[in-house]
């Protein structure tokens, strides 16, 4: 610990950003002088529990206090906040791990994997918008970004090079392996990919990305947005998960890892013509079996369901799966299978990475334990099929509203148990209140259509 403090001081760090994540996937925390590092690791930084979304903690008594206890290995100097290092924290209440802390929920799920000698690796691909506000309107921050099909547009990348390079540089200095950045299929929309990692670390990295992007966009006079669907006539922002399962993996000796999802021939050699091993097939079957409940967690806003629909956009497609199907390299299905891994395409940019990953693990393990088999591989372009054709193939729809998804979550005992009683109760309560508020709101569209219509 002494060495770590000295290394931080040598890097110019004088303050720690004690950061935890609330139920909505929003980073919270406070600044702590480096001189109190030991206390942050042992006791934690104190917060008023009921002031944090989703805790359900009382206003009085020993359980009124929420303590964010730091993990020393996560201490990372933040280039955009000179002198400050982020340290990722877990929630504790009354001296015990807090059951409704999203990171604690994922740690419990990871522990269940470890009991089997397994570790999950994820590569999370966040899509986001760079926006500006013009009165009551939200617009792309790049007024020249107006192509009908803007995917991979290099001119927009050049115009936003200042921000994008600063973001890449900041994340690289924090130890993230930035793989690529591209312009996505909507105006003002981008995607940044960083290297895959162990599930808990990958979720931590996603929160670090959000912190960096929010601060740097603001410095450039823009708004960084992970709203799933800011523009009705354009694609929304997904947050796809690339998932693989590993045995005998030690982060200090990664060469010893073995990917459990890689299929093998009878002679023991890898089968390059197949996508997933039997364990991999069972895992994705479990994900599909619990997909309705999972959708509440990975598409957690009323706005999310304006993304999860199949309809034409300015660019020609929505790129969001509405149908519960799986198939090799099929980007129109909920699960796109690849050799030794799969891409979960349902999550959107507003999803809490800790809760999403924890529920994914629980669903996948249920499929493995019950030896479930997924439906047949789908090679069709599902966006080209009519709803009648989809039904003829026996392909189910994902929930088409937040209310429908919440009902599925409430009925799914496994996923509720994974989240824990407190978090499940708080999540359902908060999200049902969100629906009620949305339903009471009268939109500009309604006024334009109905105010003088009758």
Image (spheres, rainbow, N blue to C red):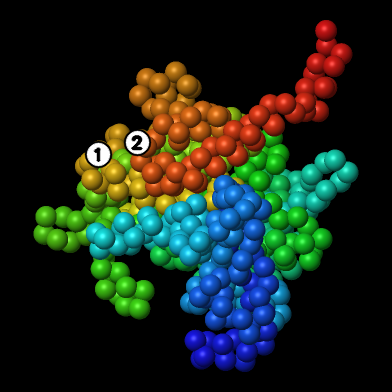
What SS does tag 1 mark? loop
Q: Please give the residue where the numbered disc 2 appears in the rendered image.
A: 289
Above or below, 288 relative to 159: above
Residue at left offset 57%, top offset 91%: 6
Q: Please give the residue where the numbered disc 1 appears in the rendered image.
A: 372
Report the front residue among 331 and 245: 245
Residue at left offset 56%, top offset 33%: 402
**Tags 2 and 1 touching, CB below 8 Å:** yes
Taking the image as shown, residue 441 lies to the left or right of residue 125, namely right
Above or below, 400 relative to 257: above
Tell me where residue 22 appears, x and y as whole percent. 58, 54
Is there any visible trace of residue 286 in the rendered image?
yes
Report the front residue among 47 and 441: 47
For residue 315, which numbered disc appears in the image? Answer: none
Residue at left offset 61%, top offset 81%: 36
Is there any visible trace of residue 192 in the rendered image?
no
Report the front residue among 44 and 220: 44
Q: CA distance from mark 2 to mark 1?
A: 9 Å
Taking the image as shown, residue 356 lies to the left or right of residue 258, namely right
What SS does tag 2 mark? helix
Q: Earlier in the sequence, mark 2 or mark 1?
A: 2
Tell me where residue 320 appears, x and y as whole percent. 53, 39
Label 2: how many Cα within 10 Å (few below 14, some 14–19, many 20+):
some
Tell me where residue 37 appears, x and y as whole percent. 58, 80
Residue at left offset 58%, top offset 55%: 61
């Amino acid at each position: 610990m002494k060495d770590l403090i000295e290394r931080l001081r040598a890097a110019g760090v004088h303050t720690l950003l004690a950061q935890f994540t609330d139920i909505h996937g929003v980073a919270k925390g406070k600044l702590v002088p480096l001189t109190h590092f030991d206390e942050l690791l042992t006791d934690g930084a104190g917060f008023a529990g009921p002031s944090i979304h989703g805790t359900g903690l009382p206003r009085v008594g020993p359980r009124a206090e929420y303590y964010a206890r730091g993990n020393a290995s996560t201490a990372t100097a933040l280039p955009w906040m000179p002198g400050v290092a982020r340290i990722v924290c877990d929630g504790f209440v009354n001296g015990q791990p807090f059951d409704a802390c999203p990171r604690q929920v994922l740690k419990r799920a990871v522990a269940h994997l470890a009991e089997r000698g397994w570790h999950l690796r994820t590569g999370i691909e966040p899509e986001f918008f760079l926006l500006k506000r013009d009165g009551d309107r939200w617009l792309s921050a790049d007024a020249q970004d107006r192509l009908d099909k803007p995917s991979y547009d290099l001119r927009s990348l050049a115009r936003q090079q200042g921000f994008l390079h600063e973001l890449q540089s900041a994340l690289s200095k924090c130890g993230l392996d930035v793989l690529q950045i591209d312009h996505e299929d909507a105006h003002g929309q981008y995607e940044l990919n960083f290297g895959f990692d162990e599930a808990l670390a990958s979720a931590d990295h996603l929160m670090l990305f959000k912190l960096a992007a929010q601060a740097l966009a603001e410095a450039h006079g823009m708004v960084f947005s992970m709203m799933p669907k800011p523009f009705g006539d354009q694609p929304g922002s997904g947050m796809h998960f690339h998932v693989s399962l590993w045995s005998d993996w030690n982060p200090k000796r990664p060469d010893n890892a073995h990917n459990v999802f890689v299929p093998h021939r009878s002679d023991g050699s890898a089968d390059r013509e197949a996508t997933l091993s039997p364990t991999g097939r069972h895992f994705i079957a479990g994900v599909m079996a619990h997909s309705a409940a999972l959708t509440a967690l990975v598409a957690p806003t009323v706005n999310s369901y304006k993304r999860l629909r199949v309809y034409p956009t300015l660019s020609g497609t929505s790129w969001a799966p509405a149908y519960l199907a799986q198939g090799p390299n099929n980007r129109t299905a909920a699960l796109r299978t690849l050799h030794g891994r799969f891409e979960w395409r349902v999550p959107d940019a507003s999803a809490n990475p800790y809760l999403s990953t924890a529920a994914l693990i629980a669903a996948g393990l249920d499929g493995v334990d019950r030896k479930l088999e997924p439906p047949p591989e789908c090679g069709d372009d599902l966006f080209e099929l009519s709803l009648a054709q989809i039904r003829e193939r026996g392909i189910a729809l994902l929930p088409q509203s937040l209310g429908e998804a919440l009902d599925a979550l409430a009925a799914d005992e496994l996923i509720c148990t994974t989240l824990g009683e407190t978090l499940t109760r708080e999540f359902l309560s908060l999200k049902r209140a969100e629906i009620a508020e949305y339903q009471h709101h009268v939109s500009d569209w309604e006024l334009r259509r109905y105010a003088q219509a009758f």
